[in-house]
Image (cartoon, rainbow, N blue to C red):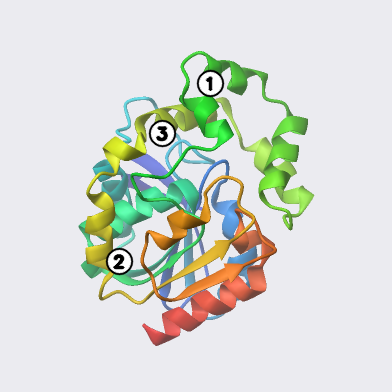
Amino acid sequence: MKKVSTLGIDTAVFERGSGPDILFLHGNPDTHFAWDAVIDRLADKHHCIAPDLPGYGETRMDDSFDVSIDKQGAWVDSLVTGLGLSRVHLAIHDVGGAYGCSFVAQHPEKIASLTIFNTGFTPDQPWHFWARVWRTPVLGEISMKLATRGLFVSETLKGGPKMKREYAEEAWKHYTRETRRQVLRWYRYMTFEKVLAGWDVRLREAMKDIPRQVLWGERDPYIPSFVRDRFEVPDVHNFADCGHWVMMEAPDESAKLIAALVARA
C-alpha cells in the first residue's frame, strides 16, 4: 500500500501486477478489498490499481472534503495524475461509479476503456430503503450508531446472493465511524434529480468513442435494471443469478470480460 496526495487527502492505493493500467473504484460499504477476487485473476498480465475512496478503508478524511459531483471526478483525476498515468482502463461500481462517471464525463481523453458494474448515474434513479434512511437527518445517525455486525452482514448478503459470508464479515471490520459519517454525507448530497441533471447526457457524449461495457447483476435490490439502460451502452452482460456485487459473485467471468475489453481497446 502507498499513499497518494489527492485534493488535500492522502489516498491509500493498493497495486498488483504489471501490464495495462486498470483502475478499480469500489462502492459502499466496501474498500479496495471488493476487487480482490477479480484482481487475483488479472494481476499476472495487468497493472491493477485499487484505491480506498475518501473516508473508506485507509483513506482518512474529515468533513471538509468536497463531495460535490465535479469534485468526485476531480479526485479521480488527481489520483491518476498523482500515479503518473496519462490514461487508464477504468472499472467502477456503486459509489465509486459516481466518482468514475464524473471523471469520464470531464476527461474522456484519459479513459482507455470503461467497465461499469452495478452503478447509477441518472437523475431519475430511485433510492433504496437504506439510502432513504441514511438521507434522513437524525434517523440516519441513529441507524449508523445502532448498526450491529449481525445486521450488517445479513443485509450485505441479501444484496449479494452469491457473496461469500467471509467477505461481508471482513467488510464490517472496516465500516468505521469515519466511514459511516462519509456515507451520510455522500448520500445526503447526492440528490440525483438535482445533482445529476445534465451529467448523464454529458457522460453518454463523453463515452461515445470509449470502448465500454456493462456487467450487471439482475438480483440487485438497490439499483433497478432501468438504470443500467440509461447508460445506453450496447455491450451489456447480464448475470441473472448475481446481485449487487458481480465482481465478487462471478469473479471468473468478470475478469475475463475486463481482460477482453482491455485487449480490444
Residue 119 visible to an observer of this rendering: yes
Viewer-closest of 111 and 3: 111
Q: Please state the horizontal and vertical placement of residue 4, each as a whole percent of the image.
A: 37, 49
CB under 8 Å between discs 3 and 1: no
In this rendering, the label closer to the viewer, 2 or 1:
1
Q: Earlier in the sequence, mark 2 or mark 1?
A: 2
Residue depicted at x 26% and y 72%: 208
- Does 114 appear above or below 150? below
Q: CA distance from mark 3 to mark 1?
A: 12 Å
Neighbours of disc 2 within 10 Å: few (<14), some (14-19), many (20+) = few
Q: Earlier in the sequence, mark 3 or mark 1?
A: 1
Looking at the picture, does residue 263 appear above or below residue 126?
below
Label 3 residue SS: helix
Residue 263 coordinates in the image, percent (x, y): 44, 85
Q: Which residue is mark 2?
A: 85
Q: For this view, does 107 lie left or right of residue 118?
A: left
Q: Residue furthest top?
A: 138
Percent from the top left, x then y, of residue 180?
53, 28
Mark 3 belongs to which amino acid?
Trp
> Amino acid under label 1?
Gly
Q: CA distance from mark 2 to mark 3?
A: 27 Å
Mark toward the viewer: 2 or 3: 3
SS at badge 1: helix
Q: Quadrant of residue 261?
A: bottom left
Residue at horizontal 73%, vertical 31%? 151
Image disc number at residue 186: 3
Name the residue that disc number 1 marks: 140
CA separation in Å, label 2 and label 1: 38 Å
State the image coordinates of residue 176 (x, y, percent, origin top left).
59, 30
Q: Name the residue nearer the viewer: 255 or 162.
A: 162
Quarter the C terminus occupies: bottom left
The amino acid sitting under disc 2 is: Leu
